[in-house]
Amino acid sequence: MTEETMGIREMCDTFNVTPRTLRFYEAKELLFPIRKGQRRLFTKRDRARLKLILRGKRFGFSLEEIRQLLDLYHMEGGKEAQLQQTYEMAQKHLTDMEAQRAELDDAITELKDQMAWGAEKLAQLGKKSSAAA
């Protein structure tokens, strides 16, 4: 491959994804590799898009949200619109993630309390069994 393009194996190795993942993103029209027979050649643009897709997925963005953000880039004034829209979506996702974390922290605390209660009860039952023997 050239510096300008990468084959599917190089993309998989570089981004730690499977060929199936790349084909899925291509089918969803998020990536647009050059087709040469059965081979796919991914351009710098595809690599940049894949990096953004993976980052967006890690942050909890849906594929549709990612598509909208990627599509904004190519519109007039797209870079600014893309940045603004990304910021707004990120703010919403951050708020959602923080709420989820708070719920998870509460559940962890409650589970630890229940486990401590259970351990105490087991210890009490163990003492009764030892005394009876």
Image (cartoon, grey):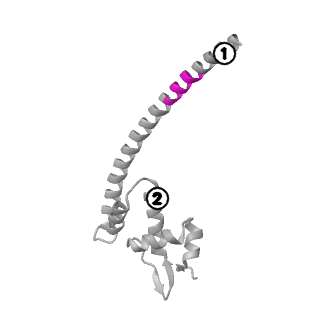
- Identify the magenta region: 111-119
111 or 90, nearer to the observer: 111
x and y, in percent, of residue 51 in the image: 48, 65
Q: Amino acid at mark 2?
A: Arg
18 or 117, nearer to the observer: 117
How many numbered marks, from 0 up? 2
Quarter of the image where one finds residue 78: bottom left
Is-magenta flag for residue 118?
yes
- The residue labelled by disc 2 is 55
Image point (41%, 41%), residue name: 100
Q: Is residue 126 above or below residue 11?
A: above
How would you classify the magenta stretch by its main secondary structure?
A: helix
Residue positioned most to the left: 76
Q: What distance separates the C-alpha of mark 2 from that of mark 1?
A: 56 Å
Q: Is residue 7 above or below residue 50?
A: below
* Residue 83 relative to residue 111: left or right: left
* Residue 129 image label: 1
